[in-house]
Image: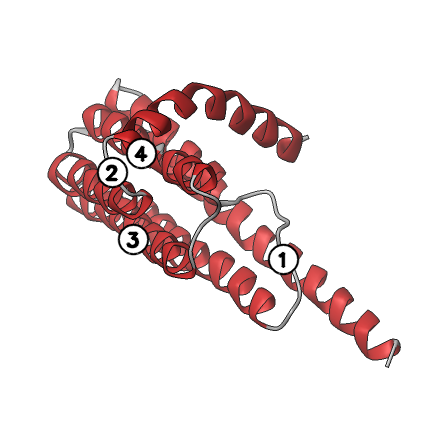
């Protein structure tokens, strides 16, 4: 169900961003430039706002610039597909942005003396990196690992909602969201490892 919702939401958003993508391409803007600009925007939202306790502004800024992940992909598709460097740059910038978001959350929670929340944020930071690494490593070995309940879109959505609710005065919302996300990310790692194990076992059995 989560996967169906994500695909449907992405299809709807694609129809919205396509005119913007066409306009940027006509203006000579490259998908790689959009990727870098989006990451810089996320860094500003996370570090200049979120880490300083301006959670509502930080969450809104991060969400806005995170949408460039869909925009640069649409632009690349319109140009005939992503280049190898473009795909590499996109993945690398995603990791930087994710690190900034969860690092900023951990920093702010530490200042509030919320050690449990800090622990959850650090688990999310590490587990999120492992989720992405497992997929990349599987693909490097000729397999797939595009499964799981907590892919990048879901991770940013959950922490964004938690930040907004805390910013509006519901203080436990962000730590609760982080613990939910931590559990979901760890579960996703397990899902992907099982998925890859089954593929590898089937390939070895067929040899």
First in sequence, mark 4 or 3: give its number. 4
Look at 64% across and 49% down and name the residue there.
147
Look at 45% across and 36% down and name the residue there.
78
Residue 32 spot, x, y in % from top left: 30, 48
- The vertical placement of 188 against 3, above or below, is below
Residue 56: image quadrant is top left
Characterize the local packing of mark 3: few (<14), some (14-19) or many (20 or more) Cα atoms within 10 angstroms.
many
Residue under numbered circle 3: 99
Q: Distance between the residues labelled 4 and 3?
A: 29 Å
- The vertical placement of 147 against 171, above or below, is below
Residue under numbered circle 2: 29
Look at 22% across and 29% down and name the residue there.
55
Give the number of the mark in front: 2 or 3: 2
Residue 132 spot, x, y in % from top left: 48, 57
Q: How far apart are marks 3 and 1 (CA)?
A: 22 Å
Residue 44, disc: none
Give the number of the mark in front: 1 or 4: 4
Q: Quadrant of the C terminus?
A: bottom right
Q: What element carries label 1?
A: loop
Q: How far apart are marks 4 and 2 (CA)?
A: 5 Å
Q: Is mark 4 on a helix, strand or loop?
A: helix
- The vertical placement of 95 against 76, above or below, is below
Q: Mark 1 touching mark 4, by CB under 8 A?
A: no
Q: Is residue 42 visible?
A: yes
Residue under numbered circle 1: 145
Q: Mark 4 touching mark 2, by CB under 8 A?
A: yes
Residue under numbered circle 4: 25
Q: Mark 2 touching mark 3, by CB under 8 A?
A: no
């Amino acid at each position: 169900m989560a996967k169906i919702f994500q695909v449907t939401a992405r299809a709807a958003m694609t129809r919205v961003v396509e005119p913007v993508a066409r306009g940027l391409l006509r203006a000579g803007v490259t998908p790689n430039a959009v990727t870098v600009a989006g990451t810089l925007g996320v860094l500003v939202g996370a570090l200049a706002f979120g880490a300083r306790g301006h959670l509502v502004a930080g969450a809104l800024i991060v969400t806005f610039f995170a949408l460039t992940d869909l925009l640069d992909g649409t632009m690349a598709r319109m140009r005939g597909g992503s280049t190898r460097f473009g795909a590499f740059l996109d993945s690398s910038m995603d990791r930087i942005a994710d690190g900034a978001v969860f690092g900023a959350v951990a920093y702010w929670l530490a200042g509030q003396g919320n050690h449990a929340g800090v622990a959850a944020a650090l688990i999310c930071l590490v587990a999120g990196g492992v989720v992405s690494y497992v997929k990349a490593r599987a693909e490097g070995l000729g397999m797939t690992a595009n499964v799981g309940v907590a892919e990048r879109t879901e991770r940013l959505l959950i922490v964004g909602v938690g930040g907004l609710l805390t910013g509006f005065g519901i203080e436990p919302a962000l730590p609760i969201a982080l613990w939910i996300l931590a559990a979901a990310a760890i579960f996703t790692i397990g899902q992907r490892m099982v998925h890859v194990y089954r593929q590898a076992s089937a390939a070895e059995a067929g040899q």
